[in-house]
Amino acid sequence: MRGSSLYLCLTMRRSEQPWRTNRSRVLRAEQTSAEDIIWHHLRGRRFAGLKFVRQAPVGSYFTDFLCRERMIAVEVDGATHSTEDELAGDAARTAVFQSLGYRIFRVSNDDVFHNLDYVRDHLLAFIEGRTD
């Protein structure tokens, strides 16, 4: 049976690490309400004509939203990003992203819920290089 197409189909892999695709799917299904709001504005090239994807792997991490064309990662941080350990984890994560050439735009859940126009304006300025 080694010559059959069934054998080839069963032995071929879609990618080197299929667990990443599965993990991305799980994260997308568990998206927070703040991420859902941001995604509504980023999806389908709605934001500045740029393509964003959700829960994309970057190094050993997954970012909330990613624009590969501009090398921008958007992270939506909830209340759990305020302790010393969590801030250290975010810093390590940012270092990995930056080492791979990505710039990180961080926004809080609170800003998404209460200042969405501010978030959109600052994200556009960040993408265009008018602010870091």
Image: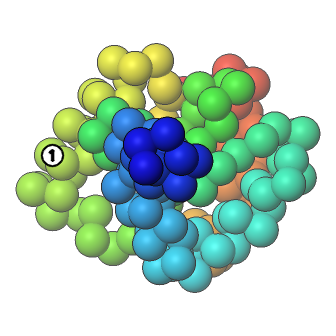
Figure quadrant of residue 48:
top right
Residue 77 appears in view: no
Q: Which residue is mark 1?
A: 88
Q: Is residue 124 above or below residue 108?
A: above
Q: Nearer the viewer, residue 36 or 110?
A: 36
77 left or right of 117 in image: left
Horizontal side, residue 45 vs residue 91: left or right: right
Whether residue 44 is visible: yes
Image point 34% across, 18% down: which residue? 99
Foreground residue among 72 and 80: 72
Identify the element where label 1 is drawn.
helix
Q: Is residue 103 above or below residue 77?
A: above
Which image quarter is the C terminus in?
A: top right
In the rendering, at what x and y percent does residue 108 appear? 48, 63
Asked which colour scheme the image uses, the reply is rainbow
* Residue 109, horizontal then vertical, whole percent: 50, 71
Q: Nearer the viewer, residue 28 or 125?
A: 28
The residue positioned 67% from the left and 55% from the top of the image is 119
Are there few (<14), some (14-19), or many (20+) residues within 10 Å of tag 1? few
Query: Residue 69 appears in which quarter of the rendering?
Result: top right
Task: Report the residue at 53% width, 78% height from top.
Answer: 29
Residue 70: image x %, image y %? 67, 25
Amino acid type, label 1 = Ala
Tally of marks: 1
Is 21 displayed left or right of 87 in the figure? Answer: right
Identify which residue is drawn at 50% across, 67% down: 25
